[in-house]
Image: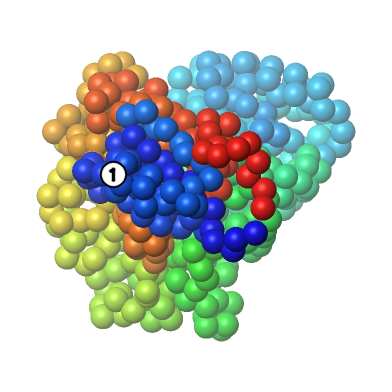
Amino acid sequence: MSAAPRVTLVVHGRLWDGAPLAHDALAIAAGRIADVGATAALRERWRALVEREVDAAGATVTPGLIDAHLHLLPWARAADDVALAGAAQRADAVARVARFLGERPGAWPVVGRGWEASRWREAPHRAALDAVSGDRPVLLHSHDFHALWVNGAALRAAGIDARTAAPPGGVIERDAAGEATGVLRENAVRLCAELERDAARAAGSDAERLAAAARALHAFGITAVHDFERGADAFRAMHAFATGPGPRVRVLQCLGETQLDGAIALGIASGVGDDAFRVGALKLFADGTLGSSTAAMLEPYEGSTSRGLETLEPKRMNELVRRASESGIAVAIHAIGDRAVRNALDAFEAAGPARARPRLASRIEHAQLVDEADLARFAALGIVASMQPIHCTSDARLARERWGARCAGAYPWRTLLERGATLAFGSDAPVESPHPGSGLAAAVTRRAADGVPFEPRQRLTLDEALAAFTRVPAALSGAAGRLGTLAPGAHADLVVWDRDLHREAPERLHEARASCTVFAGEWVHGAAAAVPARGAGTGP
Ligand SMILES: [Zn+2]
């Protein structure tokens, strides 16, 4: 048999690589994009080696999508959790927990997620859960993962009582008598980390869950992720996943504060690794979220005296940013409110020339509200704005309620681009679905669930939105020219869509699906659509 690589042609596509290309075909060989050109020319040039041909039939072909901010392990584990999204009242949530406990009897802790109490008549309270759970610990994450509602058994197991002090940047909610109500906020959520690990171990295997998650991402057209789940457990699991033999995606893995000393001691900097798995930025939290009213604000929330919560003291943030930067470790700071964004930019500015030392760019995650005075500072300091278009449309109602007139500066994608900033897009899954059609639709329409566009001046073009989901995050992971592009020589990570995205009405872009996905030259989704060009066998 010939040692020459087998070649697959994708023909009659509308190729997109930063902009629509004039060519309509590409050749894939040995896991790479081997050639780009006209269908007839490629058929002729590769005739002797072509094993199969895939007809894109006029649909868009893009590089594989890269989700620049998600938490893959929690998303993968979600299938084993109590689903609380859409629970209209506390009683609905409790009923779902009761049903779940009945279906999965045992003593291990149960985890749930997705509750959103801003419209509930009764606030979350441990007693409501105790009534259905007995001695079995129950831990329920809010929709934004910045609050945890637990029962009495979980409080006891985690050793939280009337005397427990909240960690810095965290809140243990208490009743008038000083007893914990069962609601933990921000950094206090971590008091139950051990229990959550027990729950995950008891309910199944992370390796299997991650393989299932990879298949789901491939079906979405996603071939790489920037993972923002912190800690050694997530790091180990993601490394095994991204470098193992099973279904996988490429991973840029963040570090948590607890991993910083070890990384510095070992000389592990951002950019270490390869295109399968690479060490990313140190992840810090400057504040909470809009949904929990814990995003740190320059001025109080509408109709309130609260300015949210600084979950990391500015002085400490400055120290961490400087220390990490000096050791070549980029920093990614979660900052949602305008005060948190300013604190984060101040910390990068205070790091001085050390800011430029890491091989990968530092970034601010979310940047949902940016004060006018800070908009140009992203570009000036070389800090990337890593944002999630779906947050804009999902949270539009909340933003209008709590930020009022300040919404003019909310989710300011267009202005950030105009002021020279680099914009990367992700989903923040499991907070939102990583389905890219939804992200693209949100980016180009900014149309909220009620149909009203939110600050429509900030809309992006489809090309700008696609770039923020492909070539920009590729560059941020140190893989410019190898990922996020269809250029010859790049990894063959690509998506054949089910339609011509540029001819689709913007408001219908959320219906766009990946019809085929290729990862490292392998057809990992929709491969049945591929027609062998000669004979049925593709074996050697
Ligand atoms: Zn996140």
Determine whether 428 is above or below 499 in the image.
below
Regarding residue 374, the answer to whether it shows in the image is no
Q: Nearer the viewer, residue 28 or 486?
A: 28
The answer to which quarter of the image holds residue 174 is top right
The reply, left or right, for residue 238 in relation to residue 401 is right
**Image spot of residue 11 (x, y percent):** 37, 38
Q: Residue at x 21, y 43 (%)?
A: 22
**Image spot of residue 286 (x, y percent):** 39, 56
User: For the residue with label 1, is its CB less than 8 Å from the closest atom of ligand 1?
Assistant: no
The reply, left or right, for residue 362 in relation to residue 121 is left
Picture mark count: 1
**Image spot of residue 331 (x, y percent):** 40, 66
Q: Nearer the viewer, residue 3 or 17?
A: 3
Q: Nearer the viewer, residue 521 or 434?
A: 521
**Image spot of residue 209 (x, y percent):** 69, 43
State the SS at label 1.
Answer: loop
Determine whether 301 is above or below 5 in the image.
above
Q: Residue at x 81, y 22 (%)?
A: 103
The answer to which quarter of the image holds residue 357 is bottom left
* Quarter of the image that includes the N terminus: bottom right
Identify the residue position indicated by label 1 in the image: 38
The reply, left or right, for residue 272 in relation to residue 211 is left
Category of crowding for the residue at label 1, using alpha-carbon neighbours closer than 10 angstroms: few (below 14), some (14–19), many (at least 20): some
The reply, left or right, for residue 94 in relation to residue 31 is right
The colour mode here is: rainbow
Q: Nearer the viewer, residue 249 or 429?
A: 249
Q: Residue at x 24, y 36 (%)?
A: 462
Determine whether 272 is above or below 15 in the image.
below
Regarding residue 84, the answer to whether it shows in the image is yes
Q: Residue at x 41, y 78 (%)?
A: 328
The kind of residue tagged 1 is: Ala
